[in-house]
Image: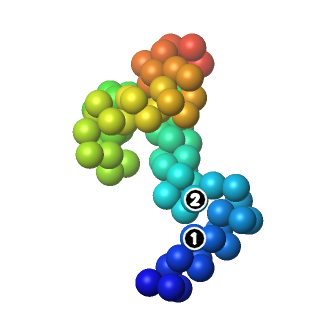
């Protein structure tokens, strides 16, 4: 347990975000790519990236980007 705590502390010191937040940001970046470069709907993207539900995906996406996935897709086209 101590090793994990040390890793988290060092990671956050170096990146300013926790490992979990970093992982979620990577998933949001991948979802942006899929929204712009595929015909998959939001639900398919959410499940492909391992989100528990499309509701959680939509909420997190909006929290991190300021737009819903649908707004992001439409705004970027």
SS category of the residue bearing label 2: loop
Q: Which element type, helix, strand or loop, lies under badge 1?
A: helix
Q: Is residue 61 above or below residue 30?
A: above
Q: Is residue 6 left or right of residue 42?
A: right
Neighbor class of circle 2 (other Cα within 10 Å; few <14, some 14-19, many 20+) is: some
* Tags 1 and 2 touching, CB below 8 Å: yes
Q: State the mark number for residue 18.
A: 2
Q: Is residue 48 visible?
A: no
Marks 1 and 2, Cα distance to the nearest angstrom? Answer: 6 Å
Count of numbered circles on the image: 2
Q: Residue at x 48, y 26 (%)?
A: 62
Residue wearing tag 1: 8
Quarter of the image for residue 15 reads: bottom right
Q: Which of the pair 12/35 is nearer the observer?
A: 12
Q: Quadrant of residue 11?
A: bottom right
Report the residue at 65% width, 63% height from top: 12
Q: Earlier in the sequence, mark 1 or mark 2?
A: 1
Where residue 3 appears, as percent x and y from the top left, is 53, 85
């Amino acid at each position: 347990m101590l090793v994990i705590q040390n890793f988290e502390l060092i990671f956050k010191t170096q990146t300013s975000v926790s490992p979990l937040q970093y992982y979620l940001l990577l998933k949001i970046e991948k979802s942006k790519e899929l929204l712009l470069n595929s015909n998959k709907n939001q639900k398919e993207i959410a499940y492909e990236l391992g989100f528990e539900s499309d509701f959680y995906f939509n909420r997190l996406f909006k929290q991190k980007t300021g737009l819903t996935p649908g707004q992001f897709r439409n705004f970027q086209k």
